[in-house]
């Protein structure tokens, strides 16, 4: 079974169950929507808008490295690592890393929901192109927790 969070709190467990239910049914039920709104509030609406706009691309390399590129609300492109729960947006830096007031940004929430629903656009890059994307975004996968 897909597990997102290592350290479980009540919110994490409820969220994970919600994602599991979406993954099984491939849809967002009224209950799942209510749970997402209770946990994430307005961020849920922003994440779903990203999905509606088809703003997520799953980028992979021949060696099975994966990053996600997400088009944000101002058409900025953010690079995210789903398994490591990392995004290079300012909201993630400020609210998740510095303040600890959130455990996700809207870009990561959109990725998690889209993966559960099976609604990803995918693109395969050569190793060279993939590494160039990582270095352009200053992401070193090996140094992440």
Image (cartoon, helix red, strand yellow):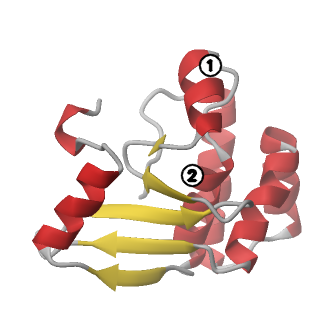
* Residue 105 percent location from the top left of the image: 64, 43
Question: Considering the numbered disc 2 on the image, is that residue within a helix, a strand or a loop?
Answer: helix
The disc, 1 or 2, on the residue closer to the chain's N-terminal end is: 1
Quadrant containing the N terminus is: bottom left
Q: Looking at the image, which residue is at 20% across and 71% down? A: 129
Give the Cα separation between the discs numbered 1 and 2.
15 Å
* Residue 39 percent location from the top left of the image: 79, 40
Left or right, 67 with reference to 33: left
* Residue identified by numbered label 2: 108
Label 2: how many Cα within 10 Å (few below 14, some 14–19, many 20+): many
* Residue identified by numbered label 1: 100
Quadrant containing the C terminus is: top left
Q: Is residue 122 above or below residue 137?
A: below
Q: In this view, does 90 lie above or below 58?
A: above
- Residue 65 in sight: no
Q: Is residue 38 above or below residue 68?
A: above
Q: Looking at the image, which residue is at 52% across and 69% down? A: 115
* Residue 3 percent location from the top left of the image: 44, 49
């Amino acid at each position: 079974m897909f597990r997102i969070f290592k350290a479980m709190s009540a919110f994490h467990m409820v969220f994970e169950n919600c994602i599991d239910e979406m993954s099984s049914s491939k849809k967002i039920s009224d209950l799942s929507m209510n749970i997402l709104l209770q946990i994430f509030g307005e961020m849920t609406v922003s994440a779903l808008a990203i999905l509606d706009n088809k703003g997520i691309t799953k980028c992979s390399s021949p060696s099975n490295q994966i990053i996600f590129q997400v088009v944000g609300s101002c058409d900025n492109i953010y690079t995210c690592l789903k398994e490591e729960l990392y995004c290079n947006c300012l909201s993630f830096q400020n609210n998740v890393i510095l303040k600890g007031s959130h455990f996700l940004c809207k870009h990561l929430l959109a990725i998690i929901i889209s993966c559960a629903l099976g609604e990803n656009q995918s693109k395969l890059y050569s190793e060279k192109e993939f590494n160039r994307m990582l270095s352009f975004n200053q992401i070193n996968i090996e140094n992440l927790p």
